[in-house]
Image: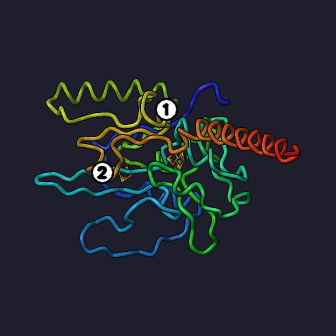
Amino acid sequence: MAEQRMGFFTDTTVCIGCKACEVACKEWNDVPDDGFVFRATSYDNTGSLGASTWRHVAFVEQDGRWLMMSDVCKHCTHAACLDVCPTGALFRTEFDTVVVQPDVCNGCGYCVPACPYGVIDRREDDGRAWKCTLCYDRLRGGMEPACAKACPTKSIQFGPLDELRERARERVERLHAEGMTDARLYGESPDNGVGGTGAFFLLMDEPETYGLPPDPVVTTRDLPAMWRWAGGAALALALAAGVAVCFAGRKP
Ligand code: SF4
Ligand code: SF4
């Protein structure tokens, strides 16, 4: 494990919706196109995160303002996708990020419904699961992820998570002091339902406005209790079967 956890701080207040992050991600990671869909209702032509959209720039049009946000895998502290993967294709890296290895993924798809953010997705043509790797290969080479490198406004910032959290808190304080009291952080708290995320956001409205779940919870939270319960039930059944065998052997 790395001495310092690395992550993303995405400050949506300075995003200009240029999509350089989406393009840089596709270029570096060789992610195929996702259909070039013209939705006719929005400038958003990728729609959502998916197997072939690892960064997604949301465009929210409100009265008098645009809200833009570059979304990504949250690299959760408690990552349900990783918990349920039966092949070990999903693993936690030395940077404390969550990565899926395409050559180990068998396409079972268990990870897809397990993700509380709807991030990880199977590709239709090969059936395997794909998502943001936080540019694992670049990190190993001492470089920052491609999206952060390409972002012209520094809306996407990469670095040690502790430093990013500190910087984000200062930014929120400054915005509040300037009268933008709607500014709030999303995902940075280790007390949230996934133990905090390695990719967190500064938002200017409720999370739902950007299509983010307001109170996500790791979907495997109750698994240990369920296994304990199942183990107890199996033991009770075995005991009952043993007692039945004993009585069956007795003469009336
Ligand atoms: S956001 Fe979803 S895919 Fe990303 S680490 Fe968390 S559970 Fe896994
Ligand atoms: S590159 Fe930066 S400014 Fe451009 S859309 Fe992405 S996050 Fe926004």
Q: Nearer the viewer, residue 222 or 12?
A: 222
The percent position of residue 47, horizontal first and vertical second, equals: 37, 64
Residue 168 in the image: above or below residue 140:
above
Amino acid under disc 1 = Gly
Is residue 27 shown left or right of residue 65?
right
Q: Nearer the viewer, mark 1 or mark 2?
A: 1
Neighbourhood count class around disc 2 (C-alpha, 10 Å): few under 14, some 14–19, many 20 upward: some
Closer-to-camera residue (104/34): 104
Residue 225, visible in the rendered structure:
yes
Residue 54, given in percent of the width and then of the height, sits at: 49, 57
- Report the residue marked by disc 2: 210
| Residue 218, label in figure | none
Which residue in the structure is indicated by mark 1? 195
The yes-or-no answer for disc 1 within 8 Å of ligand 1 is: no
Above or below: residue 153 compared with residue 113: above
* Residue drawn at x 55%, y 34% as measured from the top left: 6
The mark total stands at 2
Asked whether residue 141 is in view, the answer is: no
- Front residue of 149/76: it is 76
Q: Quadrant of residue 141?
A: top right
The outermost residue toward the front is: 252
Q: What secondary structure is marked by label 2?
A: helix
Task: Kindly identify the residue that appears in the image at 87 percent across and 43 percent down.
Answer: 250
Horizontal arrangement in the rendering, residue 30 relative to residue 205 (left or right)? right
**Residue located at (28% from left, 29% from top):** 172
